[in-house]
Image: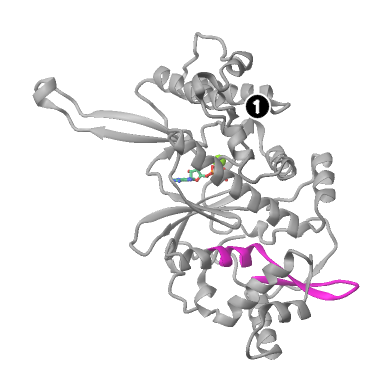
Amino acid sequence: MKLDTKAMRHLTAEDWRVLAAVETGTKTHELVPTTIIERLSRLRGGVSGVHRSISALAKTGLIGRIKEAKYDGYRLTYGGMDYLALHTYAAQDAVYSVGNRIGVGKESDIMVVADNAGVQRVLKIHRLGRISFRTVRANRDYLRKSRQGQGGTWMYLSRLAAMKEYAFMKALRDEGFVVPEPIAQNRHTILMALVDAFPLRQISEVGDPAALYAELIGIILRLAKHGLIHGDFNEFNILLKEERTPANEAEDGPDAEEQIRVTPVLIDFPQMVSTEHPNAEFYFDRDVACIKRFFERRFHFVSTAPGPFFKDAKKTVGANGARRLDAAVEASGFTKKMLKDLEAAIREQQAQRPEGGEGEYSEPDDDDDDDEEEEDDDDDQEQDDDEHGQNGNGAEDIEQTVGDHSS
Ligand code: ADP
Ligand code: MG
């Protein structure tokens, strides 16, 4: 599904309260009964106001009606959760308008947004469960058992992904790694600085492949020192930022040339694992192999040095007082169970990708409506959402204001 903020301006303060009530109700009810929504939204206008809002929200696709044997009820959709997150950012003056989607991955939507001062930022919206899962039965069964309720599970996991990614982005930046500046996190989304750079994937030539290769391997090793493995270290998740230094004729003579320095910026952290993980060596080797393969194919560069090898990297964990970021993040409120849930979900998602992560990320595409509903894989709930016409009309170049609603 796409983020379309057009309907935001038309929502009344009551509608927002009812939407928030459905979200709250979702914590205890997979299907939130109308009576609970009435109670949680506590509108002054009484029950009829709640019903009016419910129908407006259902029409816009922000909540979905589900008919069940025992009772009818509503659930929050990804669209509804997007709106609640944007509403929060708008109230914090963190986001004022939503611009282009700069891409759609299998696991996320990446939007350029702007704050009140017009400063552009990136909003990453996690969308686990967007594609339907037919493989890796074990993970699927694990996830089913882990929490009841399909839709709820994926939304919960998307929140976890955003929380984990944000925690790592902050920890890495604090340690001096070059990553986008994390600005805020809400629900299943992260707000971060826009990096003016292209993914390595789109770069056809670099001045010194050997130096860049060494720098990237250096990042893998430095992560390991802090107890971490990126787990998806590939040409899509490394942005190459160019910094130009004007020629310094005074110091370097009349023929001095402009210096261009490229700095790799690492992104995409929900799948990071600890060097203590049972499959740590596999993830480490895969990260190294991805870079080797890419450099060979794209730049015809093959390193003469073997490795690096996990067993050597493992010895450096915590060396010279390097802070253990794996432990730091685990200590920041993630339970083992949460991390395990998330890992199973991400493993499934990655299993859907073509070989080697290629095609992980596709260019923005205006009519990808095949992924319209997020949780209608093979369960048998009947959803009354055929009216929700808010998705998929490709109006992506129009900047939409979200920060001017009155509530
Ligand atoms: P996914 O989990 O779907 O792979 P990523 O975090 O890797 O999402 O982001 C997908 C793409 O969006 C990146 O390859 C990059 O082109 C772009 N992108 C993500 N974050 C930023 C950012 N902060 N600044 C600029 N571009 C970004
Ligand atoms: Mg990525």
Question: Which quadrant holds residue 268?
Answer: top right
Asked whether 399 or 220 is in front, the reply is 220
Reply yes or no: does residue 311 show up in magenta: no
What is the span of residues highlighted in magenta in the rendered image? 61-85
Reply yes or no: does residue 84 show up in magenta: yes
Label 1's element? helix
- Residue 289's x, y, as percent? 59, 22
Left or right, residue 401 beside residue 62: left
- Residue 312's x, y, as percent? 59, 13
Left or right, residue 405 beside residue 293: left
Query: Would you call the spot at circle 1 few (<14 residues within 10 Å), some (14-19), or many (20 or more)?
Result: many
Decide: is 406 above or below 319.
Answer: below
Left or right, residue 100 beside residue 117: right
Decide: is 59 above or below 257.
Answer: below
Decide: is 395 above or below 331.
Answer: below
Residue placed at 57% from the left, 67% from the top?
83
- Residue 23's x, y, as percent? 68, 68
> Could one spot residue 389 in this view of the protein?
yes
> Could one spot residue 61 in this view of the protein?
no
Asked whether 194 or 60 is in front, the reply is 194
Residue placed at 54% from the left, 74% from the top?
7
Decide: is 214 above or below 226.
Answer: above
Query: Which residue is label 1 attached to?
Result: 283
Residue placed at 64% from the left, 26% from the top?
275
Question: Which quadrant holds residue 38?
Answer: bottom right
Residue placed at 75% from the left, 55% from the top?
153
Q: Amino acid at mark 1?
A: Tyr
What residue occupies the far right of the structure in this picture?
Answer: 69
Name the image quarter holding the N terminus.
bottom right
Left or right, residue 261 beside residue 46: left
- Residue 80's x, y, as percent? 62, 67
